[in-house]
Amino acid sequence: GAGVSQSPSNKVTEKGKDVELRCDPISGHTALYWYRQSLGQGLEFLIYFQGNSAPDKSGLPSDRFSAERTGGSVSTLTIQRTQQEDSAVYLCASSSAGGAFEETQYFGPGTRLLVL
Amino acid sequence: SQQGEEDPQALSIQEGENATMNCSYKTSINNLQWYRQNSGRGLVHLILIRSNEREKHSGRLRVTLDTSKKSSSLLITASRAADTASYFCAGDQGAQKLVFGQGTRLTINP
């Protein structure tokens, strides 16, 4: 596709339920990132995938959050037992990182999650 | 913790005027990037400035970087209504991890 796509665009769920957010990166991009943007806040790094390497999970706020990337392409961010403070826009980005430090990250439109 | 802090948090100017936004960061970076986010949309990359550069231009955008002060500025000249958006700076700490500030909400009044 032309850009990074995410689904769903909006998700409303009840506290305690699990949710899955999907990201389709730009074809050929080896690096994939998840960020979270809470209302009125900047972006918060969550997790980073690079090729077949072990992901950098240092930004995940709790063990209720997990992510996987299958086949080096599509990624799913899963939030278990959602809490109201999980409400935010979840943004996915990809880049053609080849080990350099100057790769531009291209962002998707985000998934707006509301936990009631 | 967040790396960048934008200043001001909100800026409202008349169309045609120049808009200047500032960003400060805390730790060493490899490069600094500016992004724009329109309401309800994803982030759009505007410009990247490397740690060994002091100034960079792209169209109506001018970015400066002062690594001794750990600060950067974004200047938008001859502003247009379409420039209304939130602007974020992001510091690349290496390992491809960008850390963003809270952004500056820019409003261009016709």
Image (cartoon, coloured by chain):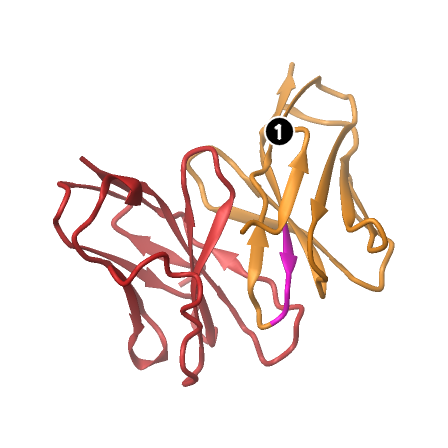
Chain colours: A red, B orange
Q: Quadrant of the C terminus of chain B?
A: top right
Which x, y percent locates residue B102? 56, 39
Which x, y percent locates residue B89? 64, 47
**What number of labels is visible?**
1
Q: Quadrant of residue B82?
A: top right
Query: Which sits in the foreground, B64 or B39?
Result: B64
Look at 40% across and 69% down and name the residue there. Answer: A57
Residue A35 shown left or right of residue B90 in the figure: left
Which x, y percent locates residue B109? 64, 15
Q: Quadrant of residue A10?
A: top left
Look at 57% across and 69% down and name the residue there. Answer: B96
In this rendering, is residue B21 above or below B17?
below
Residue B20 shown left or right of residue B45 in the figure: right
Which x, y percent locates residue A35? 43, 55
Q: Give the overall secondary structure of the magenta segment.
A: strand
Q: Amino acid at mark 1?
A: Gln
In this rendering, is residue A12 above or below B50?
above
Q: Is residue B49 visible?
A: yes
Residue under mark 1: which chain is it in? B
Look at 40% across and 65% down and name the residue there. Answer: A25
Q: Which residues are magenta?
A: B90-94
